[in-house]
Image: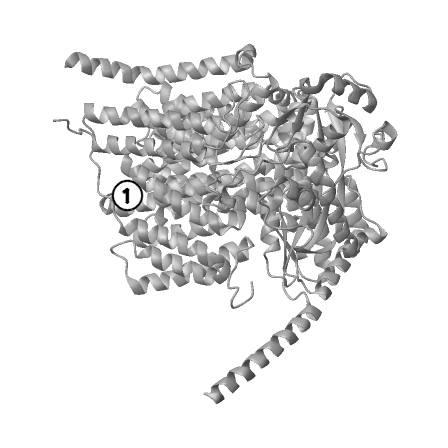
Amino acid sequence: MKQALAVVAVATATLTAATAATSTARAQNYPTRPITMIVPFAAGGPTDVTARIVGENMSKTLAQQIVIENVTGAGGTTGITRGAQAAPNGYTIMMGHMGTHGAAPALYPKLRYDPTKDFEPVGMAAGTPILIVARKDYPAKDLKEFIAVLKTQQDKANEAHAGVGSVSFTTCTMFNVMIGVKPTRVPYTGTGPVINDMIAGKVDYACDQIVNLVPQIQAGNIRAYAIATPERSPALPEVPTTKEAGLPDYQVSAWNAVFAPKNTPKPVVEKLNAALVKALDDPGTRKRLLDLGGVLPEGEARTSAWLGEYVAQEVARWTPILKAGGAVQADSG
Amino acid sequence: MDSFIGNLELGFSTALSLQNIALCFAGCLIGTLVGILPGVGPIATIAILLPLTFQVDPIGALIMLAGIYYGAQYGGSTTAILVNIPGEATSVVTTLDGHQMARNGRAGIALGIAAIGSFFAGTVATLVIAALGVPLTRLALVFGPAEYFSLMVLGLAFAVVLARGSILRAGAVIFIGLLLATVGTDLQTGDERLTLGMVDLMDGIDFAVLAMGLFGFAEILRNLDNPETRDVVQAKIGKLLPSKADFKQAALPVVRGTLLGGALGILPGNGAVLGPFASYTLEKKISRTPRRFGNGAIEGVAGLESANNAGAQTAFIPLLTLGIPPNAVMALMVGAMTIHGIIPGPQVMTKTPGLFWGMIASMWLGNLMLLIINLPLIGLWVRLLKVPYRLMFPAILLFCCIGIYSINNDPSDVLLTAFFGFAGYAFYRFGFEPAPLLLGFVLGKLMEEKLRQALILSRGDFGTFVTSPVSAGLLLLAVLVIVVAIIPTVRKGREEAFQE
Amino acid sequence: MIRIRAPQEIAAGLFLIALASFVFWQTDDLTVGTMRALGPGMMPRALATACGLCGGALVILSFLKDGASLEHWSIRGPLFILGAAIVFGLAIRPLGLFVAGPAAVIIGSLAARDSRFVESILFAAVMTTFCWLLFKVLLSLPIPVAPWLLGY
């Protein structure tokens, strides 16, 4: 009996030492096989495109393929839940976003992860600025007039969004609350139909990501009143910033950032961050991201630590706004 | 007219480069394969193959990806005809007569007519896009929520006509389909509806899950219960290609299907799905022998395959001219274009004419290639039917499981499919047919969304559905279709009453 | 003596009524709204009502007209086919294709009376290899192959 116990003890000790050794060794050799990046939105959308562009370059740096896996659902939270529960060995990472790691706690009371606790932040990838747009013959010349008209119209105005939990929904909730307007909100499934009906003049306004809107604005099918970033976008130089146009507090960007599950080893996270930063510096990748109208992080904003703090700030920012906008579901079972 | 020919010249010169021909061929081949495999669809495949296209120039990449999309339409019909499993939403109706033709030993003929009809439709659709692309986009803009709703109601009226059995049972099954479409998160409030607390149902039931369960698994269970009929099917092989008489019967349906499908494909929000249903209903109604429908009528296959393919091609119009994707696959193409640095929008046609016309030309080439790929394969498929069923059904089972899993990389989808498989078997025992349910399901989501949007925009005024001429017209048509469908039953009832 | 002339009809009808009741129970907490402002509960309940009415009609008709009789439900088919799918679903992520695939094929083939055991095993091996080549190698779908052995 004693011998058996001794054997078991030695075996366990050896195995533990071996696993510890191999896991540090693995961290040094990381990555030795392809890495899965979970994208919680449908393929072809802005987050997916950003992930693919950045992932392609990171694959070269890490010498291993980054495989994109689209896991859609529930405003992106299904995919992020899957990522949060994955093994923290650095072979599953995810592209989180303003919705999944900022607004989600307010929108989904039964959320199965905590954006501030259940992840190792890797780094910010790119943000897409939000534009305030309206149908092309809306009776207002600029943002100030637009806000004035909306205030008189209140629920006669039709605001279109791409569904509860989408970027257009959360950002416009903030806009409405900020200017004190309660429009009639018309829900759509996806940005395509929103743009379609706006071009046809059936809905009045929306707040959406620049990527989807640039060609329509350039062609004159839709009019843009302002862009919610500190500087004008090179893709749309004639559109004033919210600061210039008179609503400086409205600063939103649908940011996309890379996360790993909590307890992923530090050296692995650092390697991923380094690859991400290298991708953001690569001229080819930069150009493609900027062509989309993306805003790239610089300097300190590229570090993992900064991302961790930013996420906490975002969660704190969105919760009161969404509650004020009446977007939070009552606890229904 | 000069510029039209000039544009076509530009298009073909772009499409006929060696690289682009090879990419087109690769896309079509992969697309056919993907269409044949149950569950795996063009969306998953295009998403996976996207990184491979980074090495290639944008036009080549898009040519290949487009090939995958319309190639999948060809492949989806193959499984529908051979094993009664619809590969795509658009192949559901093909199972009705296509599979019956296979049971009658005319599988080869069904596959042949499907391929040839699709080629014809593809050719016509390509010409239409080239000549009328821009004006047709304006048609799409006319369809607001109210018009769309009425179109969906018309689609449901088609579903009633589609049914083989009693109208009461068909109606019930359609209602169940509509009910299943409501499962998920509410559009306006975000409330969970009928999700039974399961996270996987929060985004609704996936079409493939429902189709694989109700058609794929239930079909296997049905065949296992009737070993005599399934062996008879395998004994008959029959001719491999359509005869002259078959062509004659199929010719006009092909033309009508092309027009219907092509027109509906332009509508954003997946209007293309209605094409095959509309075509089938039309053919059944104007045929002099409607009883043949549901038992292997060739018009039932020819018309809707053409509608299918025409719709798949014209779906590119809103994408290429306006930059607005009409369905999920096109949304993916938007992403593909964006990654390659082309922002889709109204200026794509003017700023990069090579892309626009090159894609159109290569679509026609793709159709030609698909015809060449698919016709010889018919012999192979037909021989596959001779495999003993005890080996075939586990293979189908495995393909379905893998295919379903690959949609969302979610094992619960497979479990859900098993549930619907059981439900499908129960339906069979109760005497319900599954096809109208799938139609109800596909239409249901869009219908409720458009109904509520229309009512929100009109502030609750139901008159909005009749004040718009397009909407009123569609509703009227729907009423007519249902009345015409019910009249024979009512007449029969009266005759029986008189006889007693 | 009231006789059920169409057993299949009455079974179908009762099923529809049961389904309708289930939906009403599950949507109890949703706001129905008014005709002017449709709430989330409106559509499901309206459809459930329609189903229930159809069910009622079928039940009534089953007493008035002759119809098909209810055939016997087999156990073997559903048990093994659906069981195979369930096993596949549960096994695919932890155990991968190399285990879930053969399991599905072997369990599934037990559903047919004329299946032969050795043949099933061989066929399972062949099919799994073929599927691996097709889905994993050719189409590069992210399907777990053997996480316990290969790590992916």
| Left or right placement of residue B61 versus residue A123 in this view | left
Is A244 on the left-hand or right-hand side of A52? right
Question: Position of B267 compared to B94: left or right?
Answer: right
User: In the image, what residue occupies the spot 31% across and 65% down?
Assistant: C118
Residue at 77%, 38% in the rendered image: A252
Give the residue number, with chain letter if any, for mark 1.
Answer: B233
Q: Quadrant of the N terminus of chain C?
A: top left
Callout 1 amino acid: Val
Quadrant showing the C terminus of chain C: bottom right
Q: Residues within 10 Å of mark 1 (few under 14, many from 20)?
A: some
Q: Is residue B59 above or below residue A181?
A: below
Foreground: B73 or C24? C24
Q: Is residue A192 above or below residue A51?
A: above
Q: Would you say residue B225 is visible in this rendering?
A: yes
In the displayed orientation, state which residue is furthest to the right: A244
Number of numbered callouts drawn: 1
Which x, y percent locates residue B149? 52, 21
Which x, y percent locates residue B477?
45, 15
Q: Quadrant of residue B212?
A: top left
Classify residue B490 by image quadrant: top left
| Residue A330 position within the rendered picture, expressed as x and y whole percent measured from the top left | 58, 35
Side (left or right) of B305 relative to C6: right
Frontmost residue, C15 versus B101: C15
Secondary element at tag 1: helix
- Coloring applied to the structure: one colour
Point out the residue furthest to the bottom here: A3
Is residue C65 among the parts visible in the rendering?
no
What chain does mark 1 sit on? B
Q: Nearer the viewer, residue B143 or C95?
A: C95
Residue B455 is situated, as x and y percent measured from the top left of the image, at: 56, 19
